[in-house]
Amino acid sequence: MGWVGRVAARTPSESPLAFFTLAVPGETSTSLSGRWETECNRRFGSGENRLVVAPGSADLLHGVSLARSRLNLANVLDDAANRQIPTFVVGPPPRTDVPESALGDLSGAFADVCQRRRVTYVETFEPLRTHEQWLSDTSAGDGTHPQQAGYGLLAWLVLHNGWHEWLGLPQE
């Protein structure tokens, strides 16, 4: 179910909400910036549409500079704002195959871009980098993706860091 399914299941709403994940494993922010609008246009309806962006840490594996990562996210957020699409950003969680300091810097850069644009940013790196359950879950698998408890932790962070306020819904 991943963290998105868990968040969707815990989001009460009078009218049905539709969630579509557009995740591409190993995708850089450059690729995400280039495709988000086309992908969303295929799925957006005539009602209220919102965008959740969860840039991962693939930029670190593919040599994308921190400045370029910032610019890529800024472009997505600025384009969405110009289209009046409310946006919410979930930062990259810890993983074992990239340097911790570089991932911390990337998360901080994404947080700064969001703060400058007054977009809600959920920091996942810092709260999870030393969390025993997260570390256990990711090391039991491929070192990148958590197991069930880890996805639950990500969902908890999203649900308790502005999700309901962003949707204009009462906190559960």
Image (cartoon, rainbow, N blue to C red):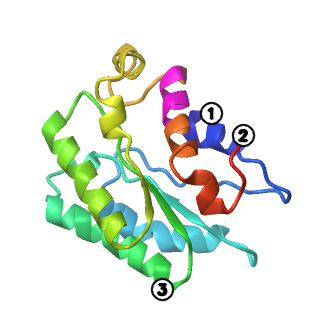
Marks 3/2: CA distance? 30 Å
- Give, as a single range, the part of the protein colored magenta: 149-154
Res. 59 visible in picture: no
> Quick one: label 3, few (<14), some, or many (20+) residues within 10 Å?
few
Q: Earlier in the sequence, mark 3 or mark 2?
A: 2
The kind of residue on which mark 3 rests is Asn
Q: Residue at image x 24%, y 62%? A: 69
Q: Residue at image x 44%, y 66%? A: 119
Check the image and report above or below for 41 versus 152: below
Labels 2 & 1 near each other (Cβ < 8 A): yes
**Label annotation for residue 82:** 3
| Closer to us: 16 or 158 | 158
Res. 168 visible in picture: yes
> Quick one: label 1, few (<14), some, or many (20+) residues within 10 Å?
few
Labels 3 & 2 near each other (Cβ < 8 A): no
Q: Residue at image x 37%, y 53%? A: 55
Marks 2/1: CA distance? 10 Å
Residue 4 counted in the magenta span? no
